[in-house]
Amino acid sequence: MIKKLIQQEKIPLRACLLIGGRSSRMGRPKHLIKGRNGLTWIENSVNLLRPFTQDIVLSGAGDVPDALSSLTRIPDVPDVQGPLTGILAAMRWRPDSCWLLLACDMPNISSEALEWLLSNRTPESWGTVPRLKKDGFVEPLLAVYEPRAREYFEELRLSGCFRISMVTRQANIATPVIPEKLCQAWSNINTPDELSRSLRSNRSW
């Protein structure tokens, strides 16, 4: 066990932000929505990630603020749709890394949530994909994927099934239950009405 823990600590941690969604229900690019602090959601996400890793990449062809122009952009994997193309592109680009995957439409994310997620990494698991309830859906777009998980994502690509959540059917993927006080961090915003409610709640940026 000690040897496995040491090996895990040697694995570089990188973060991949997904910004390639169509945002059709919102009517505008979600990652460019500005929060109450005047920064875009993507800028707030990057600022939140930086204490955990300085290696942050962007997946998707969306425009980004000038302040983030120095971040690495990785191209989508051909013939793959949805978030799978982002995580697969990241894992192909740096196959030696553990990837913290984050969607751009989670303005309630917090440092506490990231700390909890990363603390649930174990030497045995190939990924940590949390769920809101014991018998609830998994949350694959704020999750951690170890280098070995690439094997599962490549299998999904070959099968033609692009649902990233399918990876949790593998026994080596851990699915811990999110503490109730942190559940809000995994909520995503898809419509103008949801955005208005989130702003009124004073939970989002």
Image (cartoon, rainbow, N blue to C red):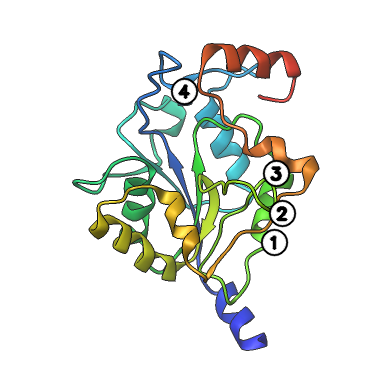
Estimate the spatial distance between the alpha carbons at disc 1 and disc 4, rounded to whole Å. Answer: 29 Å
Q: Which residue is mark 4?
A: 30
* CB-based contact (under 8 Å), mark 1 and mark 3: no
Residue 54's place in the image compared with 174, above or below, is above
Residue type for callout 4: Lys
* Element type where label 2 sits in the image: helix
Estimate the spatial distance between the alpha carbons at disc 4 and disc 3, rounded to whole Å. Answer: 21 Å
Instruction: Out of 79 and 19, give the one closest to the viewer.
Output: 79
Q: Which residue is mark 3?
A: 111
Question: Please, which residue is most extreme toward the left here?
Answer: 79
* Mark closer to the chain start, 4 or 3: 4
- Between label 1 and label 3, give the one nearer the viewer: 1
* Element type where label 1 sits in the image: helix
**Quadrant of the image occupied by residue 124:** bottom right
Q: Which residue is mark 2?
A: 116
Residue 72's place in the image compared with 34, above or below, is below
Q: Which residue is mark 1?
A: 119
* Mark closer to the chain start, 1 or 3: 3
Asked if residue 40 lies left or right of residue 122, the reply is left
- Between label 2 and label 3, give the one nearer the viewer: 2
What residue is shown at x 36% (from left), y 48% (from top)?
Answer: 84
* CB-based contact (under 8 Å), mark 2 and mark 1: yes
* Mark closer to the chain start, 2 or 3: 3
Question: Please, which residue is most extreme toward the front here?
Answer: 135
